[in-house]
Each structure stands twice: as structure tokens, then as C-alpha cells.
Amino acid sequence: MDFRISSRIEDYRSRIAAFVDRRVLPIEAHRGNYDAHDNIRLDVLDRLRAETRAEGLWCLQLKAETGGQALGKVGMAVCYEAMNRSIFGPVIFNSAAPDDGNMMLLEAVGTNEQKERWLKPIVEGRVRSSFAMTEPMPGGGSDPSMIQTKAEKHGDKYVISGRKWFITGAEEAQHFILIAKTSDDPRKGLTAFLFDRDQPGWRIKRRIDIMGPEEHGGHCELAFDGLEIDASNILMKEGDGLKATQIRLGPARLTHCMRWLGLSKRCVEIAQGYATERTGFGIRLADRESIQMMIGDLALKIEIGRLLVMKAAWALDQGSFARKEVSMAKIHVANLLHQAADVAIQINGARGYSKDTVLEWIYRYARQARLVDGADEVHKMVLNTHFVAEGGDFWHWAVTE
């Protein structure tokens, strides 16, 4: 097994790390650069985005012909981890959810016309996008087969009715990917549609208040009452909605993990820095065995997470769906992020609980990690399904030819 990365990937990683140190962390340190929802102010974001584009660090995940650098999933794992050393990092490099997953899906399955109309503006940073799938009860969440939003065909158009909620980025999005029901077929009953926020027949009912912090555009509830979508704006074919969802969500779950590893490392960095400087009862915190064990445990779990993520990234690059590998990474890294933030706050004491550090930001953000893109329990059921089907081969090594 070769765990080395290419010199090209290392070049991007080191330049990203340097940019985050030089430009992003100083911005993050000043509260005046935050918006009302604890994210980076859009005017500040636009300036930094222009800089990353000028330095050739923009949309690295996409193919060269799309406007990226074709790093592959392994290269993304390395670079996304470096980006998210700052809480503002991924969006500055145009590698944040939900745009990240939407761009990769459109690149993979969109027609040339769809790429020009719907993908190119996102790649260029002129618009943002959203993926509208999750619904309130009794609709679909982790189980897409429960989707209730309907798309009824009338001539060459589809008329949409229904509701969605917790749709990330909806308030700032211009382009939407919508999953709706077109038949009762359990495998081919869903279809993916593309629509623009300026089209009539839908509205944002509310921006749902969450524990926060929030992505730009929040997490919104949408109502559809007569939105008309032309058949040319079906992504893939009618009935391919479940397939489109699977193509998008597998890599998107893993890119979350890539970014969360960066945040976990930042937590340890802040904890270690404080423990090194803080003295109590005549001894540095860093010299206490209890603190050493806490930080050592996190270091171990971060490395386990990196290995799980890298194995899943490698499998995706080989053409596999990597379902069990992604599920393993998602469970482990989501829980790791929460633990890293919690331990770092404990070591920092009142300082960690205050807004003098980003730890409280990361702690609030981390709790959603065990829910988004499939709750822990769903991914554990996925792993059980694989284990029942594969038995001892669940742990097999791939053999070279």
C-alpha cells in the first residue's frame, strides 16, 4: 500500500494551507467580518474568492474543462482538510456544501446545455445553488422512497406541488436541484429537476432557526404550488431521481468528512496551544497526564478518520460507489468532530465556552454532523446490511491484477 500523495497534490495543499494562514485566519479572528448568522460576510467573502481564483486555488474538485484542476477524490481529501482549518475556508475556495455536491453532480450527469445553463454560473461564483430533497413528515428524509412532492406531467412541462424543508442555502440560491415523485415505482418513481429561483409557483415559507451557525442562505422550508419545469430541465431521465441522489450524496457525505477533519485538527491545535501556555497549581496543563491523554486520544482518532476518508476517496476514484467505506467515515468523523470540540472547550475552560475562540462555533456546528446526509443510525444499518450480505468478506482486501 502506498500512502504517499503526488507532488502536485502536495503543491495545492501547501498553497491552500499558506493562504488560510495568511489571509483567512486573520479575517476569522475579527467579529466584524461575520454576518448575522455567524458566517463570513458576503462582501468579505467576495474579496477572498477573487484572491483564491487569482492564485489558481478555485474549484479544485472539478475537471479542467469545467474550470477545476481534476484533483480526484484523494486530492480533494488532502486539500479540503487544509481548507477547513478555518471555519470560513471551504466557501472561499468554492468547495463548500451545497454548491460542492451540486457542481459535481451536474458535471457528472448534466447535458452540455445543462452544464452551460446551470453549472457554469456556479463554477464561476456568479450564483449559488441548493439541493431540495428533504421533506417534513410524512415525506422523505434519509429514506428517499418516502418523497411526497409530486411532479405531474402536462405536455412538455411538469407541474410541481409539495413541501421541502431544511433545504441548505435556499435563501441565497439561484439554481436548484429538486427531487420529486413522478410515479409510484419504488426504484424509478423519482425524478431530478432543475429550476431557477425567479420562476413562479414556489416560495420560501421560512428560514428555519437552528442551533447554528448557518451556511449562507440558511436552512429553509419551501412550498411548491404550481411551479412549471420544462422537460429539458430534467437531470438525467424521468425516473432517474434516486440514481441522481445516490450519485450526489455518496461523494458529498465524504467531502463533509474531509472538511470536518480540518475542523477537528483546528480544535486540537487550539487546545494544545492553550495547554502549553496555561499554568495552574504550579504546573502547565500540557504537563498533566490527564491533558496528554485527552489530546493523544484525539490525535489517534483524527488519524483513524483520515485513513477511513482516504480509503473511501481511493475507492471512489477507482469507480466504486464505496457505500460502506463512506458510511464508516461518516459515522466516525461526525462523532470525532463533536468530541474534538467538546474536549478542546474543556481544556480551554471558560475561554473555550466564550467567543474568544472559534471552539463554541465549531461545537454548535458539530452537532448537526451526526444528522446531515444520513444519521449515524442509518449508516450503521447500511454497514449491517453489507455485513449480512458479505460475511467475512466485509473486511476483504482488494487484490491487484
Image (spheres, grey):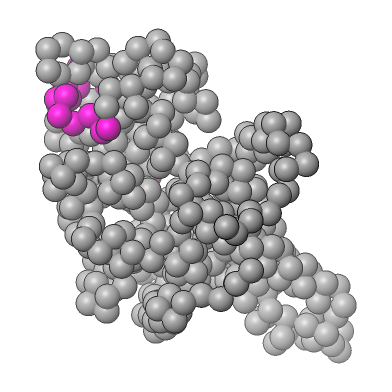
Q: Residue 324, percent across and down?
A: 61, 43
Find out whether residue 226 is within the magenta segment. yes
Q: Nearer the viewer, residue 352 or 241?
A: 241
**Total marks drawn?**
0
Classify residue 241 by image quadrant.
top left
Q: Please report the residue visible at 71 percent of the width from the left and 36 percent of the height from the top.
A: 390
Decide if residue 100 is in sight here.
Answer: yes
Q: Residue 59, percent across and down?
A: 30, 63
Q: Where's the N terminus, which quadrant?
A: bottom right
User: Can you say whether 48 is above or below 326 in the image?
Assistant: below
Q: Please report the residue visible at 36 percent of the width from the left and 53 percent of the height from the top.
A: 100
User: Can you say whether 287 is above or below 34 in the image?
Assistant: below
Classify residue 238 by image quadrant.
top left
User: Can you say whether 9 is above or below 324 in the image?
Assistant: below
Q: Residue 57, percent across and down?
A: 31, 73
Q: Please report the residue visible at 31 percent of the width from the left and 59 percent of the height from the top.
A: 62
Find out whether residue 139 is within the magenta segment. no
Q: Please report the residue visible at 78 percent of the width from the left and 41 percent of the height from the top.
A: 392
Q: Residue furthest front?
A: 401
Decide if residue 136 is in sight here.
Answer: no
Q: Where's the C terminus, which quadrant?
A: bottom right
User: Can you say whether 149 is above or below 172 in the image?
Assistant: above
Q: Residue 23, percent across and down?
A: 36, 80
Secondary structure character of the magenta stretch overall: strand
Left or right, 367 with reference to 254:
right
Per the rendered image, the range of residues in magenta is: 218-236
Left or right, 305 with reference to 293:
left
Q: Nearer the viewer, residue 341 or 190?
A: 190
Left or right, 116 with reference to 336:
left
